[in-house]
Image (cartoon, rainbow, N blue to C red):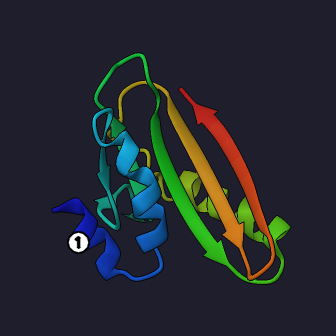
Amino acid sequence: MFVKSFCASGRFCYASGKLKRFFSRYKITSNIESGHGRSDIRMESLFPERPHIVIEFKQGEDVNTLKEEALAQILDKKYHQGLDGDCLCIGIAHNIKECAIAWLLTR
């Protein structure tokens, strides 16, 4: 089951609970080989009108730099490879007090 394997990695348990509401619209996987590495979260749309979503997390103090690094990692390592159609690539950086997000819609 997705939730168990997703939570086994520890830091994504909270996110997996929040993503449960998307299970009917997306095939959600975590740390699965795609492109030239493993993305943190990959959401493959079950409906062609919805974009696929790839999410990469970074943790550290400089969230503004880390969000860009997370997004660049998705693009550089081609984590969206094999997904036909639009793909929303999201880099999320966080620390104890802040969260920052960078995103790009690829076609």
Quarter of the view holding residue 60: bottom right
> Residue 79 location in percent, x, y?
44, 53
Q: Is residue 39 among the parts visible in the rendering?
A: no
Give the amino acid at mark 1: Lys
- Please indicate whether residue 40 sits to the left or right of residue 3 in the image: right
Q: Observer-nearest residue: 78 or 17?
A: 17
Q: Give the image location of residue 102, x and y in percent.
A: 73, 51
Quarter of the N terminus within the rendering? bottom left
* Front one among 75 and 25: 25
Taking the spot 36% from the left edge, 80% from the top edge, the residue there is 9
Closer to the camera in the image, 40 or 4: 4
Q: Which residue corresponds to the image point at 74% horizontal and 82% vertical from the top-left?
A: 96
Rendered view: 49 above or below 16? above
Return the x and y of residue 43 as percentages of the image width and height: 38, 45
- Secondary structure beneath dot 1 equals helix
Q: Is residue 36 above or below residue 49?
A: below
Q: Residues within 10 Å of mark 1 (few under 14, many from 20)?
A: few
Most extreme residue toward the top, as rendered? 49
Asked if 69 appears above or below 48 in the picture, the reply is below
Mark 1 = which residue?
4
Quarter of the view holding residue 65: bottom right
Q: Residue at x 40, y 62 (%)?
A: 16
